Image (cartoon, rainbow, N blue to C red):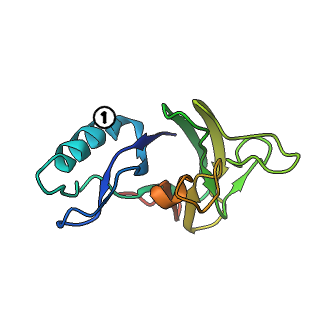
Amino acid sequence: HFQIEAIQIPIVYNKYGDYDKNGLMYVLAQDADRIQREAIRNFEKEIPQPYEGVKPLVIRVNLGDEVHICFRHHLHRRLSIHVQGMGYDVASSDGASVGFNPDSTTDREINYIWYAQTEGVFLFHDMADARSSEDATNIHGLFGAIIVEPPGAAG
């Protein structure tokens, strides 16, 4: 079970202060306030500085797990989490609004269930706005990965 939030923060890329003022991140809900607070604190320095907590979200599960994702956000747009390569019910956990399939994006909160049927690294990203323009989400950092490890793997 994972509680994941999408947050908007300035993402500083390097010590020279290069940044994306419209940065977006998936974070564990328990880390959201800390990451936002520290990223903004570092951004407000004379030369904006990166914060180590600003990085793509990576979660780990074991082969055979049923992965429950409670995803929420407080941004003024529709968002989602679409995982590539894992099993899920397209009617409820696709994280997309495609064709005649039910819309599994959200403007607030949604639950997804994914099935860890194969070991490996599987990428996830927002599919509520898949455009490649500056107004879309993925180019601003809304992506991550889930690692499926052997049964019993830990740490």
Q: Percent from the top left, x then y, of residue 84? A: 65, 62
**Relative vertical location of residue 48 with respect to residue 34 in this rendering, above or below:** below
Quarter location, residue 13:
bottom left
- Neighbor class of circle 1 (other Cα within 10 Å; few <14, some 14-19, many 20+) is few
Q: Percent from the top left, x then y, of residue 151? A: 53, 60
> Is residue 100 shown left or right of residue 74?
right
Quarter location, residue 33:
top left
Q: Percent from the top left, x then y, of residue 147? A: 50, 62
At horizontal 32% and vertical 40% (from top left) the residue drawn is 31
At horizontal 18% and vertical 43% (from top left) the residue drawn is 41
- Residue 99 showing in the rendered view: yes
Q: Could you say whether the residue bearing mark 1 is in a helix, strand or loop?
A: helix
Q: Nearer the viewer, residue 59 or 27?
A: 27
- What's under tag 1, amino acid-wise? Asp
> Is residue 154 shown left or right of residue 91?
left
> Is residue 94 shown left or right of residue 66?
right
**Relative vertical location of residue 16 with respect to residue 109 in this rendering, above or below:** below
